[in-house]
Image (cartoon, coloured by chain):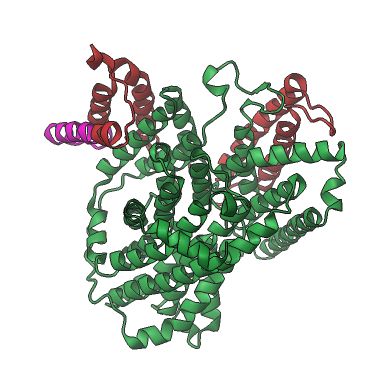
Chain colours: A red, B green
Amino acid sequence: MKKHIRTTGVFLIIVGVAIMVDSVMVLKLGNYHNPDSGFLPFWYSLLMVIFSLVLVISNLGADDRPQPFWEPLQWVNPLIAVIIIGLYGFIMEKLGYLLATFIFLLVWEKLLEHEKWLKTLVISVFGTISLYLIFEHMLGVPLPAGIFAL
Amino acid sequence: MGIFEGLFNGFSIALQGYNLLFAFLGCLLGTAIGVLPGLGPAATISLLLPVVYKMSSPATSIIFLAGIYYGSMYGGSTTSILLNLPGEAASVVTAIDGYKMALKGRAGAALGIAAIGSFIAGTIGVIGLSIVAPPLAEFALRFGPPEYFALTLVGLLLAVFLSGSSIVKGLIALLIGLLLASVGLDPITGKVRFAGGIIGLQGGFDFVTLAMGVFGIGEILYSLEQNIKGEIVTTKIGKVFPTIKDFIEAKWAIIRGSLIGFFVGILPGGGAVIASLASYAVEKRCSKKPEEFGQGAICGVAGPESANNAASSASFIPLLTLGIPGNASIAMIFAALMIQGVTPGPFLVKEHADVFWGVIASMYIGNLMLLALNLPLVGLWVQLLKVPFGILAPAVVLFTCVGVYSIANDTFNIYALLFFGLLGYFMRKLDFEPGPLPLAFVLAPIIENSLRQSLLMSGGSMAIFFTRPIAATLFAIFIALVIAQGLQSLRQRKRSKVSPEMSTGEV
C-alpha cells in the first residue's frame, strides 16, 4: 500500500504545482486588498502540495505487507463498466434514450454479469421500459428521442 | 414565531397529504438503502437530487430527502444484526454485539431494541432540534463575512478530524474538493478558471454530478471488483419485541446514546458514525458487566443505535441555522435547498418558516412511521438482500447517467460523472475517506465569498479575523484544534515507534 500512496502523493504534487503555476501566471494572485481569481486556488494547491509531501514522507520505506494495486484481472470489470458508461454518453444523443439504454443493459448483463441470453433480453427490455416510464412520465425529464424521432 | 406556534404551523404543513406521502416514501426508501450494503444515505440522496429539480415545493423535497437520511439509520441496523454486514457506516458498531445476539437466537430482541431505541432517540433529537435551532439562528444573525469564513474553516477542519480515517488524506480530499469547486467562472472577476478551453467546464462542475460520481459510480466500480453474489439469509428472527427485562437493562443506554448523539450531531463534521462509536465506548465504560461487550450485550446495540439516530436529527441544526452542512449527506440536502432556490442559514426560520418548521414536524411523524415500518416488517426488509447486484448495479448507473443528463440536457455531464466516478473509485482503493470532498465543494463558494468580502471590508487587513469577538473565538478554536491534533499525532507516532506492532500505520 505504501508504494501506491507514495505514487498518489507524487501525482498530487505534480497536479498541485501545475495549478500553482497557472494561478500565478494566468489567473493572477492580486493582493490582500483585492484578491484576483488565482488567489484562493494558489493557496489551496500550495496546501495540497504540502500535505501530499507529508503523505509521501510518512509512507517512505518498505511495505510490511506488499500487495498489488489490483489482484490479477481485478481491474477488468471496472474498466469494462467505465467503457460502457462512456459509450452510453456517446450514443445516447445519437441513437436516442430507448435504443442506447437497451444496448447498455444488454452489454452490461452479458459482459459483466455473464447472464444467459434470455435473461439478458428480459432484463434489458424491462429495464429500458421501466426507467423510461420513471423518467419521462413520472419525473417529466425530456429524454433524447434520437432515431425514434424520425 | 415561538416554538409552539412554529411547530403547530409545521405540523399543518407536514400533515398535508402530499407531504405525508413524501415523508413516508423517504422513510421507506431510507430503510431500504440502510438495509442494502453499499448504497449509503449520501449516495441515495445524491441519486435523487435530479428528482428535486422537478418538485415544486422546497418543503416537500426536503421532507423527502430528510426521511431518507434518518430512515437509513433505522435500516442500517437490520443487516448488521442479522448478517454481520453493516448496511451503512453508522451501524458498524451495532454489528459487534447485535450479530452475537442473533447467533444466540436473540435477533428479534436486538432488532426490537434497535428500533425502539432509534425511535426514542430520534424523538429526543427532534425535540432538541426544535428547542435549540431557533435561538441559534437568532444568534447567527450577528454573523458577518469574517464570522462565516472562520466558521466554515472550523466546520471543514472538524469534518476531517472526526472522519475517523487518516487526517492527511482527509485534508487532501478536502483541498481537492475546494479546487474542483474553483473550476469555471469566477463570480467576482468574471475570469474562467481551469476550464482548459472545454465549453462544458466554463460553468464549473455541477454538485449533483460530483456527488453521484464520487458516491454512486465510484461505489459501483469498486463493488464490481469483488464480484458480489446475493447472500441467502438463514438467520431466524423470532419475536421482534424485546422483553420488559431487556428494556429495563437498555433504558439508560438509550438515554445516554440519545444525548451523546445529539451533542456530537450538532458539531460540524460530527455525524451518526462518530456518535455511534462514542456511545459504544461510553456504554462499555458505564456497564457493570463490561466483559459482556462483544459477546452480545444489549446495551451495545441500544446505545449506538440511539446515538446514530439522535445525531442524524441534530445534524440538521448547523444546516438550518448557520447554513453550514456538517457531513456528506447533509451537504446533499444543502444542495437540494439551493436547487429549490432556498438559501439555508439564519434567515431560513424567518423567510422560509414553512420549510424550517415543516421539516422539523415531519421528523416527528417520520419517526413514528419508521417504528411501524421497521418492527413488524423486518422480515420483509431482509428479503431485499436477495435483489441481485447484477440488477441493482446497472439500474443505479443508468439512474445516475440519465439524472445528470437531465440537469442541462447535455451529455457532457455524463463524462464529468465518469470522471468523478473514477475519482471516487481510486479514493476508495487508496483508503481516502470521500466525505470531506463534497462537503468542501459545497462550502467553497461560502469560503471564497466571505474571505473576499472580509478583505474588502478591512481594506486588505487580515486583522479583521482576530479583532471581531465571534470570529476571533472561532479562529482560536481553529488553532486549538490544529495544535491538539498535531500533539496527538506526534504522541501516536512516538508510541508506534516504541511498539511497532501496535502501530496503525496511518498519519
Q: Main secondary structure of the magenta part?
A: helix
Magenta residues span A111-130
Residue A41, quarter of the rendered image: top right
Q: Nearer the viewer, residue B182 or B218?
A: B182
- Left or right of B165 on screen, residue B306: left
Q: Residue at x 31, y 41 (%)?
A: B393
Location of residue B344 with respect to B76 vertically, above or below: above
Q: Residue at x 55, y 73 (%)?
A: B259
Residue situated in front as seen by the camera: B214 or A40: A40
Residue B189 sits above or below residue B284 on the image: above
Q: Is residue B404 visible?
A: yes
Query: Any magenta on residue A123?
Result: yes
Which residue shows up at 41% across the image and 49% down it? B60
Q: Please state which of residues A89 and B45 is positioned toward the viewer in this rendering.
A: B45
- Choose top left, top right, bottom left or bottom right for residue B112: bottom left
Relative to A18, is B80 on the left or the right? Answer: left
Residue A125 place in picture, x, y as percent? 17, 31
Q: Position of residue A45 (x, y in %)?
A: 70, 34
Does residue A48 belong to the magenta stretch? no
State whether residue B325 appears in this view: no
Locate residue B461, reporting x and y percent.
Answer: 88, 40
